[in-house]
Each structure stands twice: as structure tokens, then as C-alpha cells.
Image (cartoon, grey):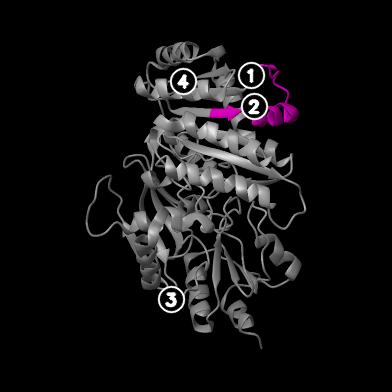
């Protein structure tokens, strides 16, 4: 009898999948990274399923790859040879939603947008909104510390995570954090697990902060520019003026062309960059008018301002189409460097220069208000990995981001794609300490091995 058969008997019927064709559909994320040959898949439906699975994995020394919606862009959910995939997508319960305390307790398989919709029934919202919010899960967002379009005002996932229920590698249950808005008892284990990419434990529930829905529907503008540097300068001016946008997104020409091919919105020949901004302040129309003026002062050729919530959604919808539009161009190496806002124009120029230098097509969008850029390197489909010129261009981009005081990843995580550059940012002391932390929580090295650190 195979050891995995014992696991199947310990769980409910149908929880364990071993058909190779079925397993393959769970073994990868949205990257080009090729998986190995996993042992099987567990479709966990409860915390007890996770406990049973991890106890079995510890007993049999089987590596475990936790998985949410499979929307990750760093290869963190890619399964290797002999690994057991632990899918949490069926754990979809919103255990509690408290309008009085402005919190929710949710399981990891809850879709991000579904939590936001549930909160809005009570006049609240869940602030983090990655572009994949309609298909990504809360568990995956926590594992990667996902950002999103609203993070310029409301922060990334960690800023909304108050406490966690975590199953450790040996099956023990750990509760971290609190239900209160403040709390400084002991080390911040919640913050440690958020962004750990499933390498320290498996999150089975989270207590997250909710916020009041703004009094008025947000006002939105879209500004067209003849150069990326002018658009970057407009971002810097808007942030320096204290406008506090709730969203500030930059889209380059290559991405605009891809979006226009997917959904014709009348892209003008002279538009090299588009800046989409939004305010959800009580005086949002006045704030957007101020941002419009700053765009015009910094070289915008045209600025459109929404006149209704529907028009706002249409403008934001263009930005949310960016990744799907780029996927139609070929295979994608999706990156997300982050730099100080003051050097955003310099980073934009460095990306453009790398594309020309190496003859690589790079489409860039950015959460410009917080300096988080997403250069997407396009290459031919069917290749096992990007060609040498793509890696060379990526190396130039990452190296320059670090030289500007930035970081390798603002929200996607390290996974396997960024590990080749990790030492450049972390340094030997930080890497040694992170390996030591990993050893405390996962002494056998079974949780998502080879990822993040």
C-alpha cells in the first residue's frame, strides 16, 4: 500500500487526487515555470484536513506546496517532484463579519472580491485589491503580501491583517495577532507569516481589518502623455502636493496598444503613457481637479475626468485589463520592482533603455503612487524559460532598481523567479537569519521548499 493511500483513508472521500492529468492542473501558477511530478493533491475543506495532511507529511517526510487560486506570478505555488499539493481553494467560509468592530474572520479560499462585496453590504470594504481580485484568494494574498490598485492609500495586505490561524509543519495550530486595531504583545508573528509564501506554515483563517466605504463614489481621471518621464513627473508632483489619491496607475504605450487590441478604446498615436488616478475623499471632485491641473502642468496632452461612477469603473477597467492583454502577446515574465517615488522617472527610463539594449519587448504598468512598477518581459510561447536576452534585460532592471534604493519585489513575492537576485538585496546576514527562522518553524524543510528565501 502506498503511503498516500493512508492519507486518502484518513480524509473524506475525494479529498486526495492522484490522477496525473488532474494533478498537473494544480501544479502550476500563472508563470511559465514548469512543475515537476507531484505525488498528489489534497483538496482541504477544513482546518482539520490541513492538520491531518501536515502530520502525515511530517511522518513520511513529504514536501508540501500550499496553493490558493493559482494566480501567483512568481512561481511560488509551482510543485516539484514528489511534492504533495495542498489546495485551500475549498475553504471559502467567511466565519464572521463584524460591522461594530470593522473586522472579518475568513478562510483562505475566500475570493478577494467576494470578501469586499460581503463587507459592502454593511457599509464597509476590504481595501486590498490586487488586479486579480476576482479570482485570487485571501490565502494567496496573505502568502505573498499582495498589493493592488488601492494600496497607495490603504496599504498592502499586511496592513489589513490583524491575526492568523496557522497550521505548522508538524500539525500544531498557532494563533497569532488579535482582533483589536492595536496590539504589541510579543513578536509580530502575524507580520512574519504574511508574505512568507507558505514556507513557515499554512494559513487556515485570518482576521482582517475592514474600512468604512467612502461617503461618495470616487472621482477618476485619465491623463495622456507624450513621454513616460512626463507622466512620472506628474505622479511626483501629485504626491508632493498632498493630494492623497486612492489610486494612481501608470500604463506605458506597449501595454496601451495591447489593451486597445483587446478592447478598442480609441488610443491616440501620440499617447506614450496614460496616468489613471482616483480620489475617494469627501471633496473628491476638487481633489481630482487639482490632480488634473498638475498633470497638465507636467506635460499631459489631454485629461478626461469621470462624470459618473460608471465612467470611473470604465477607466479603472482599462487598467485591470493590462495583464490579460499582455498574455495575448506571448509568454510573460512578470516582475514588480519598487523604488522610492522620487526616482520613479529614472526607473521608467532604465526599463525603456533595457528593452532597447537587449532587443526585448517590455510592457510596463505601475502602481505609480507608491513606486511599484510591473515590467512584463514578452517572449515566444513554448519556450521552457525566457531566452538569454530576456534574463539580461531583467538583470539590468533589477540591478538598477536596487541602485536607486528600491527592492526586487513590491507585492508578487520572490517565489522561484527572483531567487537569482535575492543575495543582491538581502545580503549574507539577512539570508542567514531568514534560514534560521525557517528552521525554527519548519525544521525538516517540508513547506514549499526552494521558494522565497
Residue 175 rendering spot, x and y as whole percentages: 34, 62
For the residue labelled by badge 3, is the local secondary structure a helix, a strand or a loop?
A: loop
Q: Are marks 4 and 2 in contact (CB under 8 Å)?
A: no
Q: Is residue 56 visible?
A: yes
- Specify few, some or many for label 1: CA neighbours under 10 Å numbering under 14, 14-19, or 20 or more: many
Q: Earlier in the sequence, mark 4 or mark 3?
A: 3
Q: Which residue is mark 3?
A: 170
Residue projecting furthest to the bottom? 1
For residue 228, above or below residue 156? above
Q: Earlier in the sequence, mark 4 or mark 1?
A: 4
> Whole-Å distance between the Cαs marked 2 and 3?
50 Å
Query: How many marks do you count on the picture?
Result: 4
Viewer-closest of 95 and 24:
24
Q: Are marks 1 and 2 in contact (CB under 8 Å)?
A: yes
Q: Is residue 239 left or right of residue 385?
A: left
Q: Which residue is mark 1?
A: 271
> Whole-Å distance between the Cαs marked 4 and 3?
52 Å
Q: Earlier in the sequence, mark 4 or mark 2?
A: 4
Q: Earlier in the sequence, mark 1 or mark 2?
A: 2
- Specify few, some or many for label 4: CA neighbours under 10 Å numbering under 14, 14-19, or 20 or more: many
Residue 179 rendering spot, x and y as whole percentages: 31, 50
> Whole-Å distance between the Cαs marked 4 and 2?
17 Å
Q: Which residue is mark 2?
A: 253
For the residue labelled by badge 4, is the local secondary structure a helix, a strand or a loop?
A: helix
Q: Is residue 60 left or right of residue 255?
A: left
Residue 268 rendering spot, x and y as whole percentages: 68, 16
* Residues rendered magenta in the picture: 250-270
The residue sitting at 75% across, 54% down in the picture is 383
Amino acid at each position: 500500500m502506498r503511503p498516500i493511500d493512508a492519507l486518502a483513508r484518513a480524509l473524506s472521500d475525494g479529498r486526495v487526487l492522484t490522477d496525473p492529468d488532474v494533478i498537473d492542473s494544480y501544479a502550476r501558477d500563472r508563470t511559465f515555470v514548469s512543475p515537476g511530478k507531484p505525488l498528489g493533491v489534497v483538496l482541504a475543506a477544513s482546518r482539520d484536513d490541513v492538520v491531518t495532511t501536515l502530520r502525515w507529511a511530517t511522518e513520511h517526510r513529504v514536501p508540501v506546496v500550499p496553493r490558493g487560486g493559482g494566480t501567483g506570478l512568481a512561481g511560488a505555488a509551482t510543485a516539484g517532484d514528489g511534492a504533495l499539493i495542498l489546495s485551500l481553494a475549498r475553504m471559502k467560509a467567511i466565519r464572521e463579519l463584524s460591522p461594530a468592530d470593522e473586522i472579518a474572520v475568513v478562510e483562505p479560499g475566500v475570493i478577494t472580491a467576494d470578501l469586499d462585496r460581503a463587507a459592502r453590504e454593511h457599509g464597509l470594504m476590504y481595501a486590498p485589491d490586487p488586479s486579480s481580485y476576482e479570482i485570487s484568494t485571501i490565502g494567496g494574498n496573505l502568502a505573498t503580501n499582495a498589493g493592488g490598485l488601492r494600496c497607495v492609500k490603504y496599504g498592502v495586505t499586511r496592513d489589513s491583517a490583524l491575526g492568523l490561524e496557522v497550521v505548522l509543519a508538524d500539525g500544531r495550530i498557532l494563533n497569532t495577532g488579535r482582533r483589536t486595531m492595536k496590539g504589541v504583545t510579543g513578536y509580530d508573528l502575524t507580520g512574519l507569516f504574511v508574505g512568507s509564501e507558505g514556507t513557515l506554515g499554512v494559513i487556515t483563517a485570518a482576521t482582517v481589518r475592514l474600512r468604512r466605504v467612502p461617503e461618495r463614489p470616487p472621482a477618476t481621471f485619465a491623463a495622456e502623455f507624450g513621454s513616460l518621464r512626463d507622466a512620472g513627473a506628474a505622479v511626483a508632483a501629485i504626491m508632493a502636493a498632498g493630494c492623497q489619491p486612492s489610486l494612481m496607475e501608470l500604463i506605458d504605450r506597449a501595454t496601451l496598444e495591447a489593451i486597445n487590441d483587446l478592447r478598442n478604446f480609441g488610443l491616440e498615436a501620440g499617447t506614450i503613457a496614460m496616468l489613471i488616478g482616483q480620489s475617494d475623499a469627501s471633496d473628491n471632485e476638487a481633489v481630482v481637479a487639482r490632480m488634473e491641473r498638475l498633470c497638465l502642468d507636467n506635460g499631459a496632452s489631454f485629461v478626461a475626468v469621470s462624470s459618473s461612477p460608471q465612467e470611473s469603473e470604465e477607466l479603472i477597467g482599462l487598467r485591470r485589463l493590462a495583464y490579460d492583454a499582455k498574455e495575448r502577446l506571448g509568454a510573460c515574465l512578470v516582475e514588480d520592482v519598487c523604488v522610492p517615488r522620487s526616482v520613479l522617472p529614472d526607473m521608467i527610463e532604465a526599463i525603456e533603455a533595457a528593452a532597447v539594449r537587449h532587443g526585448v519587448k517590455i510592457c510596463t504598468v505601475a502602481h505609480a503612487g507608491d513606486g511599484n512598477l510591473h515590467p512584463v518581459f514578452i517572449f515566444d510561447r513554448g519556450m521552457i524559460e525566457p531566452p538569454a536576452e530576456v534574463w539580461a534585460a531583467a538583470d539590468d532592471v533589477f540591478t538598477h532598481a536596487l541602485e536607486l534604493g528600491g527592492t526586487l519585489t513590491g507585492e508578487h513575492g520572490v517565489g522561484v523567479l527572483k531567487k537569482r537576485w535575492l543575495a543582491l538585496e538581502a545580503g549574507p546576514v539577512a539570508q542567514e537569519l531568514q534560514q534560521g527562522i525557517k528552521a525554527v518553524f519548519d525544521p525538516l524543510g517540508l513547506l514549499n521548499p526552494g521558494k522565497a528565501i
